Amino acid sequence: MTRNAILPSTRTTVTCMVFAMGLLACATPEMRWVTDSETRIERHGISFLPPSGENWVHAQSGTHGAAFGKLVTDAKGEPRTLMMAVINGQLKEKFDLKTETGFKQAVEYFVNDGAESGLKVIKAQYSPPYRDQDTDCIKFENSIEQTNSPVHPGEALLMDGKGIVCRHPTSPEYMVTSTFSERRKLGSDSVMNDELWKEVEHSMGSVRFTPMK
């Protein structure tokens, strides 16, 4: 199936962002840091704020969204990667996003599709559809196991994610996704605390829909 615009799976998105975080670990001077979290970013059919707080970077993105990442360490000094993205994309060839059934199927496809070597979805949970900004949305939580990390070869990593998927209110063939993931070694505890969640929610809660052009 051909995907119109850019609506990569959660795992494909995570893979690209992990690569960007690997570059961050090298402290390259070309890395673009988030310096203004109060100015909205305008993309095709959406606008949103970057995450708040320090040490977030812009990952590579295009005209349909943006991605951000942040490296943190736990109490033992182990590195953790926080990743988030806001994307507006299209899946009209396979699902009728204008129907409740089609929308649910599209959300599950987004969360579970895109199988790649070394990446496996081990948990996926969904909320019932709900209304927000005059459109239908679904929240999801998932866990992805990764065994092919170029940064941690031979180690199993866990990526716990949360996201919100909404049908674009004026262009219902488009899905707007806001996703977050924390990557850590399998068996270790999460570093997410109230302060870090506020930084992430500053962006995820700021998404607004704009007319498609």
Image (tube, helix red, strand yellow):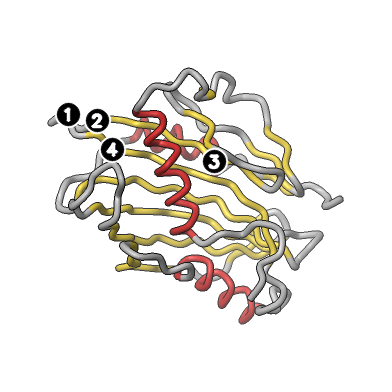
Q: Which mark is residue 67?
A: 3
Q: CA distance from mark 3 to mark 2?
A: 20 Å
**Residue to which mark 4 is pinned:** 80
Residue at disc 2, secondary structure: strand
Q: CA distance from mark 1 to mark 2?
A: 5 Å
Write down the quadrant of residue 123 in the picture. Answer: bottom left
CB atoms of marks 1 and 2 within 8 Å: yes
CB atoms of marks 2 and 4 within 8 Å: yes
Q: Is residue 6 above or below residue 121?
A: above
Amino acid type indicated by mark 3: Ala
Q: Relative to residue 4, is residue 191 drawn left or right?
A: left
Q: Which mark is residue 73?
A: 2
Where's residue 125, x and y in %? Answer: 39, 68
At horizontal 40% and vertical 60% (from top left) the residue drawn is 141
**Residue to which mark 1 is pinned:** 77
Q: Relative to residue 163, is residue 183 drawn left or right?
A: left
CB atoms of marks 1 and 3 within 8 Å: no
Residue at disc 3, secondary structure: strand
Amino acid type indicated by mark 4: Arg
Q: Earlier in the sequence, mark 3 or mark 2?
A: 3
At horizontal 45% and vertical 24% (from top left) the residue drawn is 53
At horizontal 37% and vertical 36% (from top left) the residue drawn is 22
So how many labels did they put on this image?
4
* Viewer-closest of 20 and 101: 20
